[in-house]
Image (tube, rainbow, N blue to C red):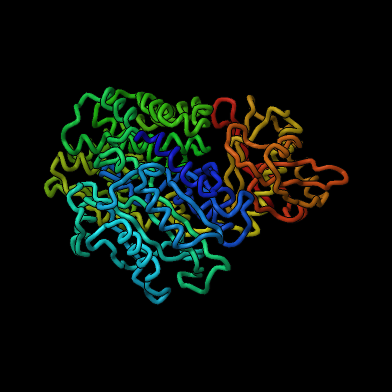
Amino acid sequence: MTSAEIRQRFIQFFEKRGHVALPSASLVPENDPSVLFNTAGMQPLVPYLLGEKHPQGTRLVNFQKCVRTGDIDDIGDNTHATFFEMMGNWSLGDYFKKDAINWSYELLTSKEEGFGLDPQRLYVTCFEGDENAPRDEESAQIWKDIFEKNNVTGERIYFMSAESNWWQPGPNGPCGPDTEMFYDITGTMTSGLTKEEYMKADTEQKVVEIWNDVFMEYVKKDGKVVGKLESKNVDTGSGFERVTMVLQGKDNIYDTDIFELIMAKIVELGSEELGSGAILKSKRIIADHLRASVFLICDGVLPDNKDQGYVLRRLLRRSVNHANKLRIEAGKLTEIAKAVIETHREAYPTILERKDRILNTIEEEEAKFRVTFERGFKKFNKIITKPVFYYDEHKPDNLTEQLDQSDKTLPGYVIFDLVTTDGFPIESIKEIAKEKGLVLDMKGFEEEFKNHQDLSRAGSEQKFKGGLGDTSETSLRYHTATHLLNFALREILGTHVSQKGSNITAERMRFDFSHGAKMTDEEKKKVEDIVNQKIQEAHPVIFREMPKEEAEKIDAVHVFGDKYGDVVKVYSIGNETDGYFSQEFCGGPHVANTSELGHFKIAKEEAVSQGVRRIKAVLE
């Protein structure tokens, strides 16, 4: 079964059971500065899991693009990926455990409608209970009945702790126990396993998680369950890449047809054949990181030293580092990126529409980093090959210290300087040090990071802690201001202006738009004046749900090329009597009136790529 067939069969299975197919949300959460990326299928649906009515109904199904960087050091093994697609179906106060579990089993095992997996190779886990919620006997009994009905014998149901069988997006918000399904990819464990045998097989990746049903019925605040949701929800899903791996009889995601073109291009460009584990891992890292980079750039992320841009920059620089190991010629990362685009163009047409921006960004970042890399390499080589005097600015007496070449130890502050000042990758430092027989003072390096903490990275790590969308007053104000800015730009520059991306933090807003020339000071002033005029006029901000066709007839502004459901939210600014001057497809939320925004000021206007400009602005 090809990945395209798996994608189609999954959607059709749940559509037949009353679910409405949704397009994927952007990788960058809209109006949510508390997290850098959507890391799970449920994140864009948090408002609806908390009780807000979804315009498409109570049964939903989709593929959601996700990025996770917490396990970046595991990339290159059999199953981990930075970018992945989460397959999911949703019940918003509709069906619950019995239907969800039965459909999960049908999807996985039915040869007519589902994936046709062997039920004798299935294993499941359930929540064992703790101070937050009781043991999930109901799910276990449903599974017991299913296995008995289908003559699946042997021990297959295991109760596990909250560490593995409780799901929550963070310390606050909807949460609940889950039941997870695992599949024996060896085909040798069809008669059941003891819990100890199952856990050993899981550790050895002989059984692989392929599906997960989360039963959201609780709410957490500051890490503690404080009550139950008004309605019970179901969030089920699985990594598309892992399911494809299992269905195509592979033991790793990189041998599936999802990565076929990408891996083939890397092999073609590299001078080494697939062989040693180190070489194979480098090939996989490049494939994963460039795939993630392509999708990030497509969704408006650009290389930077903070936030989403920092993650993208790190992925691209790691790709260059591993490309060097394979002796891939400089400037060839774009060839691999083209293979990524070709692989995903049918499922995500926008990736093809934004091909030039994607390739130009990768090409420019690679070229910049290669200059940095060469400079750092020369400096590092000079330090480790002959006695040099190295100024240690962190010592209280400010003396110059000669590095002791005899003990073969590279001090932490030298490593820190190479990484932060010269941008030399820590991975490269470790590898060269190993080749030269040097010992790295990593403890000293970590202390330097604590004392002189990299603000960009610290900001990124802090943002991952938030979990739920930020609906603070500041974020709502900036979100509404983007609509006013969009309107003003079209008034001053012309109706060719269309939104190409946006990002909101607690300090500022960023808005990317199509325009072929640098804005003049006069144009920027006119835009500011229009926005501030609309703020002073105190216009109400309302939203209406309507069929997409109707929204298009009233000329509601939207991002062309993006996918929308049959029913959309349209936010309008103005009033029905005098006419709405701004109408846009948008998920919200916004302030109730423009008078709440304050004074709008453009802080910076700059180029992003050919034909795309960026405005950074603040509300004072």
Which of 613 and 271 lies nearest the eye of the viewer?
271
- Residue 89 relative to residue 314: left or right: right
Taking the view exactly as shown, the residue that stands out farthest to the bottom is 131
352 above or below 570?
above
Q: Position of residue 436 (x, y in %)?
A: 15, 40
Q: Is residue 522 visible?
A: no
Q: Residue at 13% across / 43% down in the picture?
A: 437
Between residue 415 and residue 581, name the one nearer to us. 581
Percent position of residue 337, x then y:
40, 28
Q: What x and y, as percent, mark residue 537?
A: 83, 49
**Residue 170 visible, this angle:** yes
Q: Residue at x 16, y 32 (%)?
A: 275
Q: Is residue 120 above or below residue 133?
A: above
Q: Residue at x 57, y 62 (%)?
A: 50
Query: Which image quadrant is residue 336 in?
Result: top left
User: Residue at horizontal 73%, vertical 53%?
Assistant: 598
